[in-house]
Image (tube, rainbow, N blue to C red):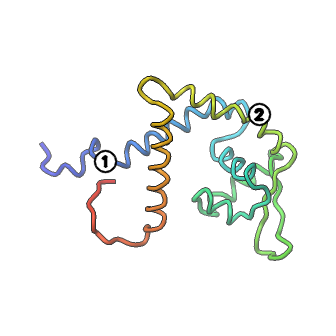
């Protein structure tokens, strides 16, 4: 029997978050397959549906991705004719991403995905208010981790 319980999988915060992330992505897959896109492509499209004509850097900030992760994804999306990339006229170093007509049309087809996913998840055991509370908590955790990723004050012991 292990004396130190810090390394037990059941005591980790990170494992259920990781597992839920994987399982949610899997739950999205059939709906996104109908649209011919992947989950990361869906995230990029949602950012652009909200605010078209963003720079690559703005998209990386919103999605918490590195440019080297996003760039190949954007190239594939451009080949699929969902987006177009162009140099910013004010700053040649910056690349602007805009939706094509195909990318804009896909939004209409994607409108039902959140509702379908909710009906897959919600039950007697998991209510909408639980999901909203979880979302708020996770957003706060993202803020904390994103803002304190380089600092370690050691003030609180949490197994993550």
Q: Quadrant of the N terminus?
A: top left
Looking at this view, name the residue that lies furthest to the front: 129
- Left or right of 43 on screen, residue 82: right
Query: Disc 2 on helix, strand or loop?
Result: helix
Q: How crowded is mark 2: few (under 14 residues within 10 Å), some or many (20 or more)?
A: few
| Residue lying at 46% horizontally and 50% vertically, measured from the top left | 138
Secondary structure type for disc 1: loop
The C terminus: image quadrant: bottom left
In percent of width and height, residue 71 lies at 69, 59
| Disc on res. 118 | none
Along the horizontal axis of the image, is 149 left or right of 3? right
Q: Could you tell me which residue is drawn at 84 percent across and 64 percent down?
A: 86
Q: Give x and y (percent) for residue 112.
A: 69, 31
**In the picture provided, is 25 more to the left or to the right than 14?**
right
Q: In this view, does 29 lie to the left or right of 112?
A: left
Camera-side residue of 7 and 131: 131
Check the image and report above or below for 14 versus 31: below
Which residue is found at the position 48% from the left and 63% from the top?
A: 146
Give me the disc on residue 109.
2
Q: Residue 157, how many percent across, how many down?
A: 26, 60
Residue at 27% in and 68% down: 155
From the viewer's perspective, is the residue at label 1 or at label 2 nearer?
A: 2
Neighbourhood count class around disc 1 (C-alpha, 10 Å): few under 14, some 14–19, many 20 upward: some
Spot the residue most to the top.
Answer: 124
Distance (Cα) linking label 1 and label 2: 38 Å
Pointer 1 residue: 12
């Amino acid at each position: 029997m292990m004396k130190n319980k810090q390394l037990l999988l059941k005591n980790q915060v990170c494992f259920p978050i990781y597992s839920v992330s994987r399982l949610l992505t899997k739950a999205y897959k059939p709906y996104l397959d109908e649209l011919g896109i992947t989950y990361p492509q869906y995230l990029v499209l949602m950012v652009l549906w909200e605010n078209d004509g963003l720079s690559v850097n703005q998209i990386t900030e919103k999605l918490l991705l590195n440019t080297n992760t996003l760039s190949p994804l954007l190239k594939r999306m451009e080949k699929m004719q969902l987006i177009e990339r162009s140099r910013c006229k004010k700053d040649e170093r910056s690349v602007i991403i805009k939706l094509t007509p195909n990318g804009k049309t896909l939004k209409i087809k994607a409108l039902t995905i959140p509702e379908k996913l909710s009906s897959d998840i919600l039950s007697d055991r998991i209510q909408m208010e639980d999901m909203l509370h979880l979302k708020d908590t996770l957003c706060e955790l993202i803020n904390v981790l994103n803002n304190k990723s380089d600092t370690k004050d050691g003030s609180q012991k949490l197994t993550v």
